[in-house]
Amino acid sequence: MPRILLINDTAKPIGDLRDALVDAGHEVLGVVDGVSALLKAVETHLPDVVILDVDSPSRDALEQLAMLHRHAPRPVVMFSANGDEQLIRAAVGAGVAAYVVDGLSPSRLHPIIQVALARFEQESQLRQQLEGVQQQLQDRKLIDQAKGLLMEKRGMSERDAYAALRQQAMRQNLKLADVARRILSMADLLG
């Protein structure tokens, strides 16, 4: 069962939600009043899931969630009384995996948490794929720059420049992008 951190940003008590989570077998790591200490609370407790109960997500709450999403990403479930479409979009944009309007019934908690976990996992995989593609593009750019430098300085064809980079990478047991990075660094050093 996921370990859960509760954030209460309402005037109402959150004890019923805590009790329902404990009864369902979840470990509730703590209850934090207000979102101002959200990032610190997550770094301290290291929860698997963050559940936020708000009347309506404020700008400060959305900013805190966006910071959490950037610095310590976790699945976030938000229970809110406000079903405004723009607020829902803003909350999802800030990293909320499940936004539930007026639905804090104990029987729905487990499936909602499972949906949040699944969406978070899917988003994490997409983010890793995106980072991989961005790295490949950056590597390709470096290789092209190094090829261009070899073509300019040594009068090589593009094919020969690529072959030279490839041979160097194999000799040094390095990635092609690492060899290109070294060549470009040396060129900067030598002017």
Image (cartoon, rainbow, N blue to C red):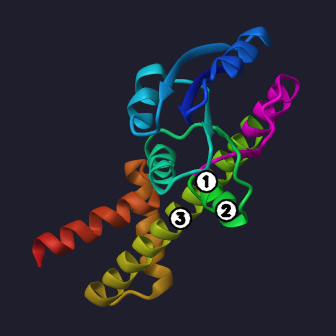
* Farthest front residue in view: 11
Give the alpha-carbon distance from disc 1 to disc 3, as whole Å.
10 Å
Disc number at residue 127? 1
* Dot 3 crowding, Cα within 10 Å, few <14, some 14–19, many 20+: few
Q: Is residue 1 visible?
A: no
Query: Is residue 150 rendered to the left or right of residue 93?
Result: left
Find residue 30 and report its horizontal and vertical position in percent: 52, 17
Q: Amino acid at mark 1?
A: Arg
* Farthest left residue in view: 190
Q: Residue at x 40, y 39 (%)?
A: 36
Compared with 1, 79 (above or below) is: below
Give the alpha-carbon distance from disc 1 to disc 2, as whole Å.
19 Å
Q: Is residue 175 magenta?
A: no
Find residue 6 and report its horizontal and vertical position in percent: 58, 26
Residue bounds of the magenta highlight: 95-116
> Disc 1 vs disc 3: which is toward the camera?
1
Circle nearer the N terminus (2, 3): 2
Q: Which residue is mark 3?
A: 134
Q: Amino acid at mark 3?
A: Gln
Circle 2: element type: helix
Circle 1: element type: helix
Circle nearer the N terminus (1, 3): 1
Compared with 41, 127 (above or below) is: below
> Disc 2 vs disc 3: which is toward the camera?
2
Compared with 182, 147 (above or below) is: below
Compared with 88, 149 (above or below) is: below
Disc number at residue 89? 2
Circle nearer the N terminus (1, 2): 2
Q: Is residue 99 magenta?
A: yes
> Disc 1 vs disc 2: which is toward the camera?
2
